Each structure stands twice: as C-alpha cells, then as structure tokens.
C-alpha cells in the first residue's frame, strides 16, 4: 500500500516590522515611496492618525456588517448590498489615501504610485499600510515609555 499523504504543514506568514520588509511583503507595495515613519510622527500626525484610524475601522465594521468578509447570508438578505460595499470601500480608500499622502516624503512620487489602481488593490494596499503603521506606532510608544522609565 502506498502512502499518498503529503506533508502539508502550515507556513506562518510573518508580518513585516521594517519598511523594506513591508515592500517585499506584498508585490503591490514593491515600489512604495518613502513615508514618515511612525516613530517620527509629530503630535499632530499622531492625532490625525487616531482620527483617520477611527474612520477606517468604522468602514471595516460596515464592511463586516455587509458581509464583505465572507458572511454570504448577510449579502442575500440585503437589497443593493454591493452598492453599499463599494461605498464603504471607496470611503476607506479616500480616507486612507489622504492620510498616507500626507506622510509621503515625495508627494508626486506617492500620487504616481497610487494612480490608475483598482479599488480592491487600493483597499488591500492601504489595509496593509494601516496594520504596519498601527503596529509600528504601538512599538514606538512602548519603547519610549520604557526609555523614560529607565531614566
């Protein structure tokens, strides 16, 4: 009897913690222009990040309610759900685009980078960037607290 089982160990994808790793993480980010890093945020940038993050998560919650992330029953029950999903995706992309453009070191390079992309790709790219900045901002804050308490 031949054993036809394959070794299918799950490979865990590690989310990047460094800018260069982020650019390699998703092929859509390979030519991502330089941006202000979370550890270099001014107080105003940190505050604006909090506002933008709140808006983005409200759109994610809306997309979840609409079944965008896999709840097909929700989609079947609602009329015009696809229109509502497109609207929530578009609002997410609009808010994220304004925020990330404000962080771009070279605004023209940033505008060129996002130009001509589909809504789904923009959503995926910005979602990845939001996660990256959220994690980096949290680490930056934690390290500053540790260094202050060490003084």
Image (cartoon, rainbow, N blue to C red):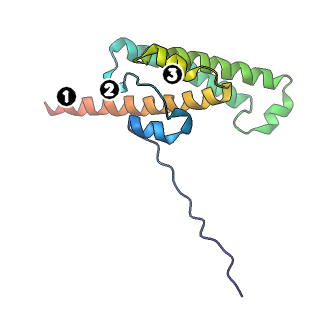
Between disc 1 and disc 3, whose residue precedes? 3
For label 2, the residue is 39
Residue at 42% across / 16% down in the picture?
Answer: 106
- The picture places residue 62, in percent across and down from the top left corner, at 67, 24
The answer to whether the residue labelled 2 contacts the one labelled 3, judged by CB atoms less than 8 Å apart, is no
Foreground label between 2 and 1:
2
Disc number at residue 53? Answer: 3
For label 1, the residue is 148
Give the Cα separation between the discs numbered 2 and 1: 15 Å
Q: Which quarter shows the N terminus?
A: bottom right
Residue at 49% across / 19% down in the picture?
Answer: 110
Q: Is residue 11 above or below residue 138?
A: below
Q: Is residue 74 above or below residue 111?
A: below
Furthest-top residue in view? 44
Q: Which quarter shows the C terminus?
A: top left
Q: Is residue 54 visible?
A: no
Furthest-bottom residue in view? 1
């Amino acid at each position: 009897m031949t054993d036809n089982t394959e070794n299918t160990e799950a490979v865990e994808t590690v989310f990047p913690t460094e800018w260069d790793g982020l650019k390699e993480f998703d092929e859509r980010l390979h030519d991502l222009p330089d941006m202000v890093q979370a550890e270099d945020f001014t107080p105003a940038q940190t505050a604006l990040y909090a506002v933008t993050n709140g808006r983005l998560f409200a759109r994610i919650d809306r997309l979840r309610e609409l079944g965008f992330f896999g709840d097909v029953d929700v989609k079947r029950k609602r009329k015009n759900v696809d229109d509502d999903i497109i609207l929530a995706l578009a609002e997410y992309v609009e808010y994220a685009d304004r925020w990330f453009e404000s962080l771009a070191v070279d605004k023209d390079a940033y505008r060129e980078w996002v130009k001509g992309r589909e809504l789904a790709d923009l959503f995926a790219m910005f979602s990845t960037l939001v996660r990256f900045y959220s994690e980096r901002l949290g680490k930056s804050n934690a390290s500053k607290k540790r260094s202050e308490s060490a003084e």
